[in-house]
Image (tube, rainbow, N blue to C red):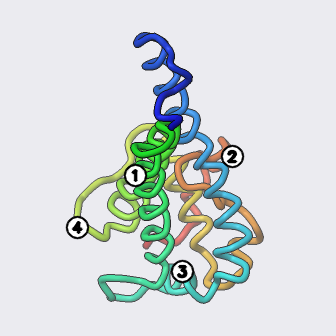
Amino acid sequence: MLNSILNLPLPYEIIVSATITLFTTIFMEWFAWLLHKFVMHGFGWYLHEDHHRYTEKRFQKNDFFAVFFSILSFLFIFLGSVYLNLLVWTGIGVAFYGLGYFLFHDIMFHKRIRNHYHPKNNYMKRIFNAHKYHHQTTNRKGSNGKAYGFLYARKKYTLLSKNLKTN
């Protein structure tokens, strides 16, 4: 079986594993942007729509996307532990991104677990503003096709919050 990363000596195996994990975590922001724009605001709008129309429900149809990526991460880790451990580190990268998404998007921004977090630094203010901007619409268009990212936002969103509705 192919169960090691090219049979590298330990220090190199650690470096390659960490690089794969970091690359996958970063890649997931780009992939999530594409998925959000073309699937969630496209043919998957049926599942994503309740996320843009606030309800008091504990769970949303939109949570299906998180379940899908959790299963994908698990499968990468499981199959990687059996066949090719490159997949383990890919699965861990997907899981790291999912954790970041959950902490920022679901807990800090949408407060699906009650908290009193308010962004203080410019980076967090910028992604909060971008997400507020995106949520100004309740249709497929998604704020005229803007702000589909989750953990990164361009600097143009830094000063945007003054004119936005709050959640």
Label 1: which residue?
Answer: 78
Q: Decide which of tag 1 and tag 2 comes sooner along the chain.
A: 1
Q: Please tell me which residue lies in front, 43 or 122.
A: 43
At 76% from the left and 68% from the top, the residue drawn is 145
Q: CA distance from mark 1 to mark 2?
A: 41 Å
Label 2: which residue?
Answer: 156
Mark 1 residue type: Phe
State the image quarter where residue 26 is shown.
top right
Q: CA distance from mark 4 to mark 1?
A: 33 Å
Q: Decide which of tag 2 and tag 4 comes sooner along the chain.
A: 4
Label 4: which residue?
Answer: 114
Label 1 with label 2: CB-CB less than 8 Å: no
Q: CA distance from mark 2 to mark 3?
A: 22 Å
Other residues around mark 3 within 10 Å, as few (<14) / some (14–19) / many (≥20)? some
Q: Please tell me which residue lies in front, 76 or 69.
A: 76
At 52% from the left and 22% from the top, the residue drawn is 16
Q: Decide which of tag 2 and tag 3 comes sooner along the chain.
A: 3
Q: Please tell me which residue lies in front, 154 or 150.
A: 150
Label 3 with label 1: CB-CB less than 8 Å: no
The quarter in which the C terminus is drawn is bottom left
Mark 2 residue type: Lys
Q: Secondary structure at mark 4?
A: loop
Mark 3 vs mark 1, foreground winner is: 1
Q: Secondary structure at mark 3?
A: helix
Q: CA distance from mark 2 to mark 4?
A: 29 Å
Q: Position of residue 95 (x, y in %)?
A: 42, 50
Label 3: which residue?
Answer: 52
Q: Secondary structure at mark 1?
A: helix
